[in-house]
Amino acid sequence: MAEVVQQESPVPVDGSGTGEPDGVGIEVARDGAALLDELRAAIGKYVVLPSDEALTAVTLWVAATHIQTALQHAPRLAVMSPTKGCGKSRVLDVLYETVHNPMMTVNTSPAVIFRIIGKIPPTLLVDEADTIFSPKASGDSEILRGLLNAGHQRNRPAWRISGPEHKPTRFPTFAMAAIAGIGDLPDTITDRSVVLRMQKRKPGEKVAPFRSRYAAPELNALRDRLAAWLGPLREKAARMVPKMPVEDRAADTWEPLVIVADLAGGHWPVSARAACLAMTRHEVVQDQQSSLKTRLLRDIHRIFERTNNPEVLSTHDLVAALIQDAEAPWAEHGTKGLNAYHLSNLLRDFGISPANYRFEKGRQAKAYMRNRFLDAWARHCPDLVEAAPEPAPETALARPAQGKPPAAPAGSLPVGPPGGPAGPKRTP
């Protein structure tokens, strides 16, 4: 007999930042677009975000926390900075005064968070995530990462043995969360996040000093007005299926923000979708540049270009060229730098491997054929393939030791990013 599992479903309930609104003294916003404009201006008053699109995204994310019980996905807000002093903690300060039922934490154990999240979850605000997810962190960091990953989508509970009778207990994980830290967060978290890559303010960029006793009343008033406006719209929000400019997980992450924008009207539906496209495109580029294996593909492409795109490069020459790049990580890869074994391992997932080749004067050595990289370049570095020159004509310099080299893939290679034509496109 099939097991019947009780599913969580969106729960349309009322609730504001720290309690239930009673409607007394709260100005109910009749114009959602104007209210979001006010919130956007208030956030921009205290923090300098990476772009106008980022400010739009944070505004919508804050508003979405007030209807999270009606949502199917709980997007994370990843606030990352390369160094201290970039404003990430100030972002959390502003969020604390504007989101629904904030729970600020630096080192709270996963067990506590498991027990706090319920049908009406708080908004998690996690600071100093770089210490949580550092290599020296305890095993709790992996549990917390699993919780944050699972909580992005409804109906992903965590099961634990709990209570004096040691019974399996189901703990909800669904809750919106903002995570701030120095350096990159784990890929599994950023993949579920609206990402803010903070930078230090330029000399001409100024913000108002943030003092809780002065700033909190203004921000709390906006919080209460958001709750009063969005509270009656939860059931409508739960039924909405907005048209998204992206697909797959990016669409899951941005859908709550677009729902809020569509509820508000005015310029917000267009602004939300423009921010979605701009920021997801930026993350596609960041991912391409930061991924070690993608970096390797790009560096190998540059080496082939620099040597006039020969049909083949020996493993020895390719490794030497990679190590000589002072700006690349290959000289410090492993314990003594990149070697032939490392190179083979890194390329294995792309279906690329070396073979024995006979070079001029009968010299035979392990080598990599250029046409074996074409598919990987097309899939993972499409901008390189668009402008890539044709391979050099076959010459007597390199010949396979046995048999003929494999033919290039038939037909036209894909040049768009994974996700299809509706997904994020590369920024020109």
Image (cartoon, rainbow, N blue to C red):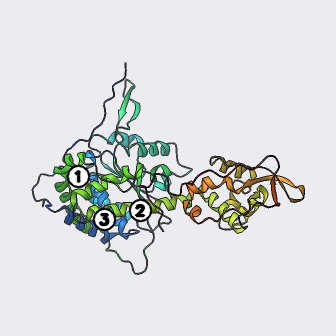
- In three-dimensional space, the C-alpha distance between marks 1 and 3, rounded to whole angstroms, equals 29 Å
Q: What residue type is labelled 1?
A: Thr
Give the label on residue 122, or none. none
Q: Which amino acid does label 2 sit on?
A: Met
Residue named by callout 1 = 18
Residue named by callout 3 = 271
Q: Which residue is drawn at 61% across and 59% down?
A: 295
| SS at circle 2 | helix
Q: Residue at x 49, y 55 (%)?
A: 185
- In three-dimensional space, the C-alpha distance between marks 2 and 1, rounded to whole angstroms, equals 31 Å
| Residue 183 visible here | no
The reply, left or right, for residue 380 in relation to residue 249 is: right
Residue named by callout 2 = 279
Q: Residue at x 69, y 50 (%)?
A: 407
Lower sequence index among marks 2 and 1: 1
Q: Residue furthest bottom?
A: 204
Q: Position of residue 191 (x, y in %)?
A: 45, 52
Query: Which segment did they paint magenta?
Result: 410-426
